[in-house]
Image: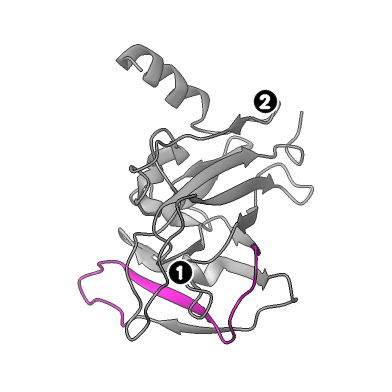
Amino acid sequence: MGPTAAAAQRRSIGNLQPGRAGRRFDDLVKPGRILLDATSFGIALLLIGASPVCPAQSPAGARAPAESAKPKTLALTWRPTSDGSSEVVAVVVAETLSSAADPRALSLRAPVTYAGVRGIADRVQHLTVRDSIGDVPLEASDEPADPGGFPNYRHWRATRPVHGAIAVSYRALVQPPPGRGPPFGIRAYAGGVTGAGSGFLVLPEHQGRVRSRVHWDLSDLAS
């Protein structure tokens, strides 16, 4: 893709404005180039060439089984919602991971603080995880805060093994106004939303190679 085409795509999926049709982005990444974390979404949710899956690392004391030749998939739907007001108040997220790299050690994470933006994980509401058996109980824990303001994360760990595909759902509130500072959070803007993936995503971690697919659902925005 040349520079002109890439720039046009970035403009088309930057700030979301009311009245735009929903867009689907299939297979945005190439196999072998998808071990990137949420920060790769970039400012204004620029998705070109990025994957939402956290980097592959083996949890302490856990030994993941060998990955199959077929890559796992992560399907995400992002629905900005205004709750009837003139501005977006949250993004409702649904994620489906085709399978866990290690069914005995499923974990998710989101930043508590990232690039000076605080309270990101605190603005995650109604987080639920389900598998083929039913609800998956979670235990949350926070990494110690860094006095210099560097990123620290909240981890949600499953308290039982998971089976089959894993469905994750939650609602991520936008930053409260005035929302000054670096644009690494997620903010309401002109009836749409702008920000970065690091400002609202709760993502599976330790998953190895994963192919992602993102669908924007703009049905709640004003026409």
Image coordinates for residue 204, horizontal then vertical, percent: 49, 64
Image coordinates for residue 4, horizontal then vertical, percent: 35, 12
Which quadrant holds the N terminus?
top left
Which residues fall within the magenta stretch? 144-168
State the predominant SS element of the stretch in magenta.
Answer: loop
* In the rendered image, the vertical position of residue 220 relative to residue 24, given as above or below: below
Seen at 34% across and 51% down, the residue is 36
Residue under label 2: 20
Q: Is residue 147 magenta?
A: yes
Question: In what element is the residue under mark 1?
Answer: strand
Residue 179 visible in the shown view: no
* In the rendered image, the vertical position of residue 33 relative to residue 72, given as above or below: above
Residue type marked 2: Arg
Residue under label 1: 109
Residue 43 visible in the shown view: yes
Neighbourhood count class around disc 1 (C-alpha, 10 Å): few under 14, some 14–19, many 20 upward: many
Q: Which one is in front in this view, the residue at disc 2 or the one at disc 1?
A: 1
Which quadrant holds the C terminus?
top right
**Position of residue 203 in the picture relative to residue 209 (left or right):** right
Neighbourhood count class around disc 2 (C-alpha, 10 Å): few under 14, some 14–19, many 20 upward: few
Residue type marked 1: Arg
Seen at 67% across and 46% down, the residue is 79
Seen at 51% across and 74% down, the residue is 106
Name the one closer to the observer, 32 or 138. Answer: 32
Q: Is residue 151 magenta?
A: yes
**Distance between mark 2 and mark 1 Cα atoms:** 31 Å
Q: Earlier in the sequence, mark 2 or mark 1?
A: 2
